[in-house]
Amino acid sequence: MLCTIGAMLTVISMVGFSRMGEGSSQIAVMIPLVLLGLGWSLFQSPNLSGMFNAVEPQFVGAVSGLSLTSANIANAMGVAVGSVLFLRWLNYHGLADNTVPLYTQWAAAPEKYIRAFQSSWLVIAAITSIAVATSAMQGADVRTREKA
């Protein structure tokens, strides 16, 4: 249940990021960041606990290393996917270059960058919603039911 709630909060935060624009206030930035941190902590903690409880004590170190390696790879892939999405949305919204110009040049056409930013977050939120669905389909731990 915590994983599902955490994943939902993460998706809600990403939808919040997608609604940001030029006139967004500080609170409009802070709320999605808080939701993202809360969602991630609610999602990640039960997952790590489940992984560590699923293995014999002598393998906890290996599982820890594997989970950290997986997280680092996922972070790198997330940055890469986010960058590609942003560039492709810029192309879609009318910027015909194959590279993103320096941020100092964004003032020339801010609407294109804002739309690309918003569209990218919506796609990422849609992808992340898969975690909500898979987490919600996850049943209760069989070991917990057996102990009751």
Image: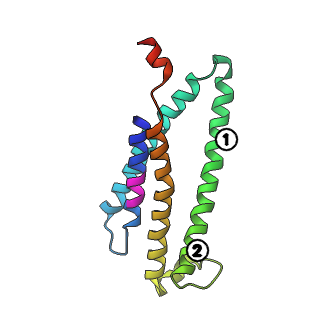
* Quadrant of the snapshot with the C terminus: top left
> What coloring was used for the rendering?
rainbow
Q: Specify the farthest residue to the top.
A: 147
Q: With respect to residue 129, does 121 lie above or below? A: below
Which one is nearer the viewer's eye here, 69 or 89? 89
Q: With respect to residue 122, does 35 lie above or below? A: above
Taking 11 as reference, is 82 left or right?
right
Q: What kind of secondary structure does the magenta stretch mostly adopt?
A: helix
Of the numbered discs in the image, which one, if any, rests on residue 69?
A: 1
Of the numbered discs in the image, which one, if any, rests on residue 88?
A: 2
* 2 vs 1, front mark: 2
Which one is nearer the viewer's eye here, 102 or 73? 73
Amino acid type for the residue under numbered disc 1:
Thr
Seen at 64% across and 78% down, the residue is 99
Seen at 60% across and 85% down, the residue is 96
Q: With respect to residue 15, does 90 lie above or below? A: below
Amino acid type for the residue under numbered disc 2:
Arg
Look at the image and give the residue range highlighted in magenta.
11-15
Seen at 58% across and 25% down, the residue is 52
N-terminal label among 2 and 1: 1
Where residue 130 appears, as percent x and y from the top left, is 50, 50
Q: Residue 14: within the magenta?
A: yes
Q: Alpha-carbon neighbours of circle 1 within 10 Å: few (<14), some, or many (≥20)?
A: few
Where residue 95 appears, as percent x and y from the top left, is 56, 84
Seen at 57% across and 63% down, the residue is 82
Where residue 113 appears, as percent x and y from the top left, is 48, 77
Element type at marker 2?
helix
Kindly indicate the quadrant of the structure image that contains residue 68.
top right
